[in-house]
Image (spheres, rainbow, N blue to C red):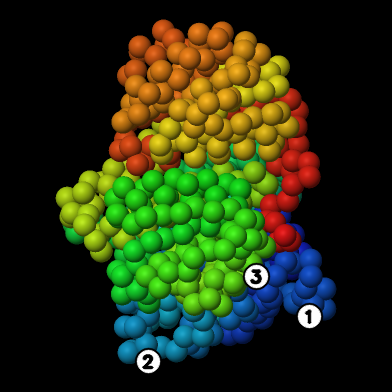
Amino acid sequence: MCGIVGYIGKQDASNIVLSGLKRLEYRGYDSYGICFIEKDKHHLFKRVGKIEKTEQDFLNKNFKGSVCIAHNRWATTGLVNEENAHPHCDCKEEIFVVHNGIVENYKELKEKLIKEGHKFSSETDTEVIAHLIEKYYKDNLENAVKRALDDIRGTYGLVVASVKEPDKIVVARMSSPLIIGVGDNEFLVASDPSAIISRTRQIINLDDGEIAVLEVNNIRIYKEEKESKKDIQIIDWDIELAEKDGHEHFMLKEIMEEPNVIEDAMRGRLLDDMGMVKLGGLEGVENKLREINSLSLVGCGTAYYACRVGKYMIEEYADIPVEVDFGSEFRYKKPIIKKDGGILFVSQSGETADTLSCLKEMKEKGALTLGITNVVGSSQARETDAGVYTRSGPEISVASTKAFLGQLTVLVLVTIYLGRQRNMSMVMGKRIIDELKRIPELAKKILKQKEEIEKIAQKYKEYKNFWFIGRKYNYPIALEGALKLKEISYVHAEGVAGGELKHGPLALVEESFPTIAICPSDSVYDKMISNIEEIKARKGLVIAIATEGNEEIKKIVDDVIYIPKTLEMLTPLLSVIPLHLFAYYFAKSLKRDIDRPRNLAKSVTVE
């Protein structure tokens, strides 16, 4: 995700850029860097960690300049250190770049550039861009940028400056937002409005494929060699709203990002024609994974529920028996470590204390340890034998939403990876991949119902107890829905396997105890209908999450939220979205502190 700030004008950029970086720190705080550009020289400052810890170091340098680019990093490729912090430069330290996005083909580009004599100083995919621009540079920066981007496969929000042409900044966008702030004899560039809104409310939104050349008194924007005419828009937000992309809370912003998270998690990893996936983080243990005959999944909270969904996927499609454990319980039992088994740890932060304790103990016992996490260079990422990053970007709200979608998507990819090593046919692999590629658009379709979901949440806001029920793949989603509601609204909610209602929980059903039933048209649909009828027979209220086109269900429930049809194993990627929205709007109606619920922290780093 990361944050970008750039300035070109007649004022000293130091405080302007530093202030912008601070406002963007929610986007990334692993490291940051600032570069001032002058004729034939530059001043570069990089530090690891949050700005507040090293801000005085920067101020003591007393850097001055009217052309500057800067970046907050949320690590994706390469560890968290100063070498991997942006801005990155070419061999001659003449061209400097900051970048948000992923260069999918950076390894092959890097190998080629090294053979041509280029020397790299970081592990990042971004540095490839600087060397490509150097390769193509012939006294015109924007032309070199265009040629470099022709070689790149992936996404980018890119800002480039050069000591050879210190009177300009070149900006480019592809699937990673960038805006240009228009001031008085100055331009600013940023990844979102929060970085520039205190300086100007006039902005130009760049579209995919556009390249902008910024000079003190001029701006030129091109797309496919043709100059574009762009209208200036006025931002009517305050600073806090700008940081949240116009949303009232980070949680809603992050829910609205869920389709992008799904797409980012699978970007560059699908081998469509072969019905396979490429997970670079698992290549070092590929042969070991081929031999495993059992797998344990370990997580805490929302990550645990992702593991529960993963169990169904892996057992059904990869033919591997799977156990699922809470990280907080796993190390206190006597786990049986099998020579032909593996343990997969799932954590958003990669710093969850309970999960890390299990990981370290299992490593000491010689187990094959794997990880799924969102944070490059986290403790979990360093400790595991191999793993996969979710690429979900920073998640600010304590209640995890988009990170859960990232974990589910990666578990689908792991299922295909393990399944194709075994008995999964190419046809089945292709079918899952083809349907997975549709999920982001289907997710967007659900998000368009947010106003209807808000109305339903308002309708039920006086109730103090809720059941969430589901079966098979959607039983863990019932658990996740209940967790979200209790986390941010402080009402009692429980997730129950539909078939278990009659074994005790049904005793609590009454008019004042509504149920949210996840019942898509899948292999257990008829069973779920029976459960709903059991509840209705006892005068319980029911909100159904059902498949589009199912009109019959309206006859037996009180409210319906529809989701599109997909493969049964992929349904959790869709069915959880309305539950996240319901929890958000329910808590909003109660005026809760949604992003910072009481008693909870974002990352649990103590046992």
Give the residue type that dot 3 points to. Ser
Residue 92 appears in view: yes
User: In the displayed structure, does residue 52 sit left or right of residue 338?
Assistant: right
Which of the 4 quarters of the picture holds residue 353? bottom right
Numbered mark located on residue 31 in the image:
3
Q: Is residue 272 left or right of residue 260?
A: left
Q: Is residue 416 visible?
A: no
Mark found first going from the N terminus, 3 or 1: 3
- The amino acid type, in three-letter code, at marker 2 is Gly
Q: Amino acid at mark 1?
A: Lys
Q: CA distance from mark 1 to mark 2?
A: 34 Å
Q: Characterize the local packing of mark 2: few (<14), some (14-19) or many (20 or more) Cα atoms within 10 angstroms.
A: few
Determine whether the residue tagged by mark 2 lies in a helix, strand or loop.
Answer: loop
The alpha-carbon separation of the residues under discs 3 and 1 comes to 18 Å
- For disc 2, the marked residue is 117
Image: 81 above or below 214: below
Report the residue marked by disc 1.
61
Q: Residue at x 42, y 50 (%)?
A: 310
Secondary structure category for the residue under label 1:
helix
Dot 1, how many residues are within 10 Å of its Cα: few (below 14), some (14-19), or many (20+)?
Answer: few
